[in-house]
């Protein structure tokens, strides 16, 4: 389970912020395939005892362990490991791999002096994103004139998935072997995980050999709806999981079901 958070990663016992990104990933060593399911942060979870029971609040309530538990319950599978990263760690990781190239999908113009955040990208241009530029690209949600994604969090997720594809293509480059020391320094210093170092190296090297056709990225099936929330005393937008569609994915997808191996 990959968690992106706004604040400092800290250790697993320090959790006072909601998660901003949540992705379930499974690598099947037999089929050499990767399955990734992005989970909208507004996903409604009726078992969460938080004021606003969205899945991103699991981290604020119980850290990575509760997040693993909630995701496992949601997908009816076992989540073996977590990887937690904040913007600083993300920034350092992208620099460590030498940056990535992307084609900007839409105009992105946003300035926020209070955060010292300035985002200026033009639709259609090919840009080499170093750590700083990659952070700006990932953080963009809307422009200063309030134009942005018309499908709420789903558009942001699609942008994230496209970026992750670019990152995975970069780490498959033969030249990445020369950057392993820098990458491992970032992993040990700026990224929190309960995966043993030997497994990080083992799986990391195997992933670099996987063909693009064997990487499948999906979004948790569902739709946005308004539900009255007692804490907020008003109806709030929640992402409601389509249990039937999810059930079919879990029944048909041997990669997800075999994640316990």
Image (spheres, helix red, strand yellow):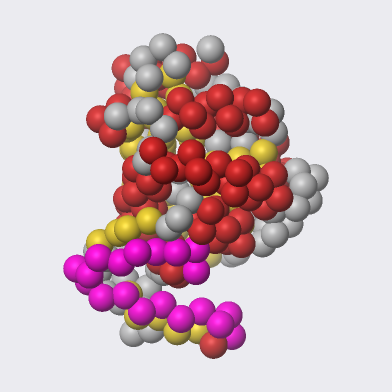
- Indicate yes or no whether the magenta region holds residue 147: no
Specify whether 165 is left or right of 79: left
Q: Which residues are magenta?
A: 114-132
Closer to us: 48 or 31: 31
**Residue furthest toward the bottom?**
113
Closer to us: 105 or 127: 127
Q: How many marks?
A: 0
Return the x and y of residue 5 as percentages of the image width and height. 60, 55
Q: Residue at x 38, y 84 (%)?
A: 144
Return the x and y of residue 191 as percentages of the image width and height. 65, 48
Up-down relation of residue 174 to residue 92 (above or below): above
Closer to us: 58 or 81: 81
Specify whether 149 is left or right of 117: left
Specify whether 205 is left or right of 192: left
Return the x and y of residue 226 as percentages of the image width and height. 42, 56
Q: Residue at x 55, y 41 (%)?
A: 180
Q: Residue at x 52, y 21 (%)?
A: 77
For the N terminus, the quadrant is top right
Q: Is residue 237 visible?
A: yes
Specify whether 257 is left or right of 212: right
């Amino acid at each position: 389970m990959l968690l992106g958070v706004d604040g400092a990663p800290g250790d697993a016992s320090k959790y006072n912020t909601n998660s901003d990104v949540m992705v379930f990933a499974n690598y099947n060593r037999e089929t050499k395939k990767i399955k990734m399911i992005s989970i909208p942060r507004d996903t409604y979870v009726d078992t969460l005892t938080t004021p606003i029971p969205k899945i991103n609040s699991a981290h604020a309530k119980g850290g990575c362990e509760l997040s693993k538990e909630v995701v496992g319950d949601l997908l009816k599978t076992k989540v073996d490991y977590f990887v937690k990263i904040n913007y600083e760690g993300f920034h350092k990781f992208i620099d460590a791999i030498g940056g990535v190239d992307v084609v900007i999908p839409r105009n992105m113009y946003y300035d926020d002096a209070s955060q010292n955040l300035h985002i200026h990208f033009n639709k259609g241009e090919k840009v080499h994103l170093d750590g700083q530029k990659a952070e700006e690209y990932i953080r963009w949600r809307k422009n200063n004139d309030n134009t942005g994604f018309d499908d709420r969090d789903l558009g942001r997720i699609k942008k994230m998935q496209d970026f992750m594809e670019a990152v995975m293509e970069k780490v498959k480059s033969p030249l990445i072997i020369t950057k392993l020391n820098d990458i491992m320094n970032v992993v040990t210093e700026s990224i929190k995980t309960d995966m043993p170092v030997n497994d990080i190296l083992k799986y990391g090297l195997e992933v670099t050999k996987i063909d693009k056709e064997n990487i499948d990225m999906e979004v948790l099936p569902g739709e946005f709806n308004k539900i009255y929330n007692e804490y907020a005393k008003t109806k709030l937008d929640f992402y409601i999981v389509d249990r039937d569609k999810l059930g079919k994915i879990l029944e048909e997808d041997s990669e997800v079901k075999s994640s316990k191996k």
